[in-house]
Image (cartoon, grey):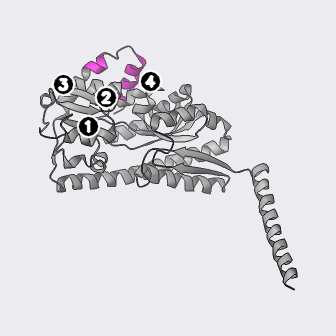
Amino acid sequence: MRDKTSFFILGLLAGILSAAVFFASMQRGGGAQKKTLKLAHGLESTHPVHLAMERMKARVEELSGGALSIDIYPGGPLGDEIKCIEQLKNGSLDMTKASTASIGMFSPEIETLNLPYLFENEAHYWKVLNSPIGEKFLNLMQNSGLVGLCYYDAGARSFYTVKKEINTPEDLDGLKIRVMNSKIAIETVAALGAAPTPISSGELYTALSQGIVDGAENNFPTFKSSANGEICKFFTVDEHTRTPDVLLIGKSTWDKLSPAEREILKKAAAESSIYQRGLWKKMTEDAIAHSQKIGVKIIYPDKAAFAKKTQKIYEALEGTKKGALAKEIKDAQ
């Protein structure tokens, strides 16, 4: 009796296994083939951009009836932004998030968005990014093997220092300020009279505490998450640049998607952008409150005086494509 029961159970298990294999093969080879895109980025899983991506993933699956999905890998498992962009270009990765500063190494025109005091304020910034001008920049990257799907808010970059308040551009004279390894970032800080010092973000806390640099520049949420407020007690809200993050998909992947799949992805990405902006605003408010709580003095200077000192950067671009794009943005106020 036991033998008969054992054979029955084994047969039942074999049947279940065969059915599972059958349905899996049908999903792979049948008309309802499921596509899963691989998205990797370097942010933590609690960051507003990652949370927006999770929202996008759910929306893609909903709109496609489960036929299209996205696997998201946060925390930089496949390398930094530059490495991820390179993988998009060679087809080994489908999607990533990158700042316009990183993308500029592959698509020079998008560096225009990194120019100092290009945007009058946050309203002007989003007016441009949500307009045909913003769409133009997303499309410009296709010549470099990349397709831009939407923009994510990365705030405005401002100066923060260890010992000296920055109230005017002259206060920056001679100070060593940490910058990203970006040509425009270096030119901007130099034009304002400081000594731009490229240092990796992971080494910045130590560089500030040891006096290797006198300050840095970034947004409030990063100022908080990096704990730089423990050392830098002056934050000057000059908002010299607004460098958006961009959700990218490799052109080789994009070309393999059907028109319907592309529309689903664009719609879900656009919705995730709006969601992310709300999260970012709340995160910024919390970071400002935290900075004040730990004794950081927040300074609101006359930004016009700072902007005036960076005009030579625009003068050098006269007659170039970047110069024309910058003028188009400034005129769209």
Callout 2: SS: helix
Q: Please name the residue that numbered disc 3 is placed on.
A: 193
The disc, 4 or 1, on the residue closer to the chain's N-terminal end is 4
Label 4 crowd bin: few (<14), some (14–19), many (20+), radius 10 Å? some
In the rendered image, residue 195 lying in the magenta stretch gets the answer: no
Q: Please name the residue that numbered disc 1 is placed on.
A: 217
Label 3 crowd bin: few (<14), some (14–19), many (20+), radius 10 Å? some
Q: Nearer the viewer, residue 260 or 23?
A: 23
* On-image quarter of the C terminus: top left
**Count of all numbered marks drawn on residues in the image:** 4
Tag nearer the camera, 4 or 1: 1
Determine if residue 157 is in view: no
Image location of residue 145, percent across then percent down? 57, 29
- Residue at (20% x, 49% y) in the render: 230
CA separation, marks 4 and 2? 14 Å
- Residue at (14% x, 36% y) in the render: 166
* On-image quarter of the N terminus: bottom right
The disc, 4 or 2, on the residue closer to the chain's N-terminal end is 4
- Asked whether disc 4 touches disc 2, contact meaning CB atoms under 8 Å apart, the reply is no
CA separation, marks 3 and 4? 25 Å
- Asked whether disc 4 touches disc 1, contact meaning CB atoms under 8 Å apart, the reply is no
